[in-house]
Image (cartoon, rainbow, N blue to C red):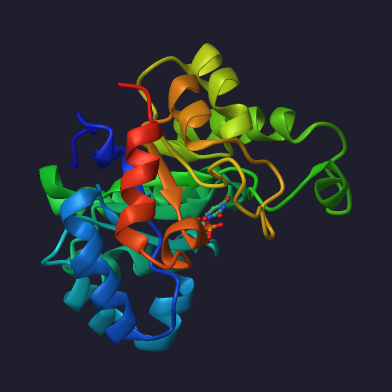
Amino acid sequence: MLQRPTTAAARIIPALDTPDADRAAALAAALAPHCGPLKLGLELFAAEGPAAMRRIAPLAPVFLDLKLHDIPNTVAGAVRSLLPLRPAMLTLHAGGGTAMLAAARAAAEAAGADRPILLAVTVLTSMDAAALAATGVAGDPAGQVLRLAGLALAAGADGLVCSPQEVAAIRAEFGPAPYLVVPGVRPAGSAAGDQARTATPAEAVAAGADWIVVGRPITGAADPVAALRAIAGSLPR
Ligand SMILES: O=c1ccn([C@@H]2O[C@H](COP(=O)(O)O)[C@@H](O)[C@H]2O)c(=O)[nH]1
């Protein structure tokens, strides 16, 4: 399994959110020497499929962010189908429940010591309290994040995806063991876009994030490598 990062730059996971495999590969080649894993998500996988993964994987460990969410048998099958691509990290929705997460873990075990880190997505960072309430979950998103975190870790998830605003509470409740991967980070002055629960990269790492996921602030910059390096330079040592 992938080890925790030991340098500031290695904490940064750029999100290669584009439907264009050539653009993703060019970004990956430029960014890989200056960052940690590279994130391949739904936009690129839906457009280009496993071929995109095969192009990116030689450059860096790949965080395959497909957010699996289906009945246990189907998710276990999807995990088995993805294992030959050798993702370093793989996401599932914690809301899929205990049986789904346990089935994913059992399927991933087939890859032995090289299996991907299984990350349970708690509450999407684009959701605020009102958006969450509209789904029938009243109250502060942090309460639901902690509830899903406990369920997911007990079911066999290795770590969690959460917003920077819940990192400290998760560390206080679950300690140092779970891998925490944190999107929704925004350098000071950059646009939040559709992200609702944000903080700066430095705040996320200071709170206890292992990795931060950064998409548009890097990929939308005139000089993505310079943007990435500026974020790395802002992180606590
Ligand atoms: O709760 C979540 C889970 C995943 N993501 C993903 O992270 C990146 C963030 O991109 P930005 O451009 O920096 O907003 C994106 O690929 C999402 O799919 C998330 O944002 N929140």
| Residue name at image x 25 percent, y 60 percent | 31
- In the image, residue 101 sits, relative to residue 7, either above or below, namely below
Give percent across and percent down for residue 81. 28, 72
Which quadrant would the N terminus be assigned to in this image?
Answer: top left
Q: Quadrant of residue 3?
A: top left
Seen from the viewer's position, the closer of residues 11 and 96 is 11
| Residue 94 % position (x, y) | 56, 46
Asked which quadrant contains residue 22, the reply is: bottom left
Residue 97 placement (x, y as % from top left): 58, 46
151 left or right, relative to 29: right
Horizontally, residue 141 falls left or right of residue 129, namely left
Residue drawn at 60 percent across, 51 percent down:
190
Residue nearer the viewer, 17 or 45: 17
Q: Quadrant of the C terminus?
A: top left
- Tell me, yes or no, if residue 39 can be seen here: no
Q: How many marks?
A: 0
Q: On the image, which quarter does residue 12 sit in? A: top left
In-front residue for pair 116/226 = 226
Q: Is residue 133 positioned above or below 45 on the image?
A: above
